[in-house]
Image (tube, rainbow, N blue to C red):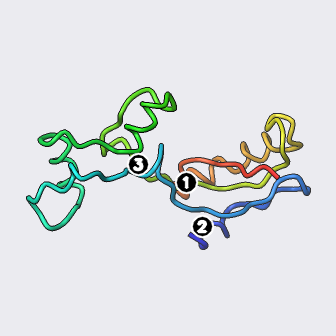
Amino acid sequence: MKQLIKHIPKPEGEHIKVLEVKEITVPHLYCITPKHLTGKSIYLDSKAIRDAEKNHGAVCDTCRDWVKHGRQAEILPYDEHRNELTLFLEVPKGDLNAVLGLKEYLQKIKPVLQELKIDGVAFKQV
């Protein structure tokens, strides 16, 4: 992924800094519970997780907790937890719309991000 960052144009000025490109799990990592350990397989791969959801009532424990505490509307199945390649930018704290040159920079790099198959952008505010 360090190779990808070389292809992303540098921002002009001092308000925006390119940090890294990395894969993140959206909306969060899938959390396994004892219900996922059905004994059908010694491996807990995607097929085993889907089977545990379908036949044993297993769910993502993070989803269960977040729904319980009102942080998420519903429990999502395994296949709705996805990995996305994300560009991380450092910007000043505050309203992103007020960051000098950010909108223009994002418009400029959008075709590059699409070509590199980068799914989105995240911001670290300092």
Q: Which mark is residue 4?
A: 2
- Circle 3 packing at 10 Å, graded few (<14), some (14-19), many (20+), is some
Q: Are marks 3 and 2 in contact (CB under 8 Å)?
A: no
With 81 as the anchor, is 102 left or right in this view? right
Reply above or below: 87 against 7: above
Tag 1 secondary structure: loop
SS under mark 3: strand
Q: Is residue 73 above or below residue 79?
A: above
36 vs 2, nearest the viewer: 36
The residue wearing badge 1 is 118
Label at residue 82: 3
Q: Are marks 1 and 2 in contact (CB under 8 Å)?
A: yes
Mark 3 vs mark 2, CA separation in Å: 20 Å
Q: Nearer the viewer, residue 26 or 42?
A: 42
Position in image of residue 114 (x %, y %): 56, 50
Instruction: Point out the image quarter for the N terminus.
Output: bottom right
Which is in the foreground here, disc 1 or disc 3?
A: 3
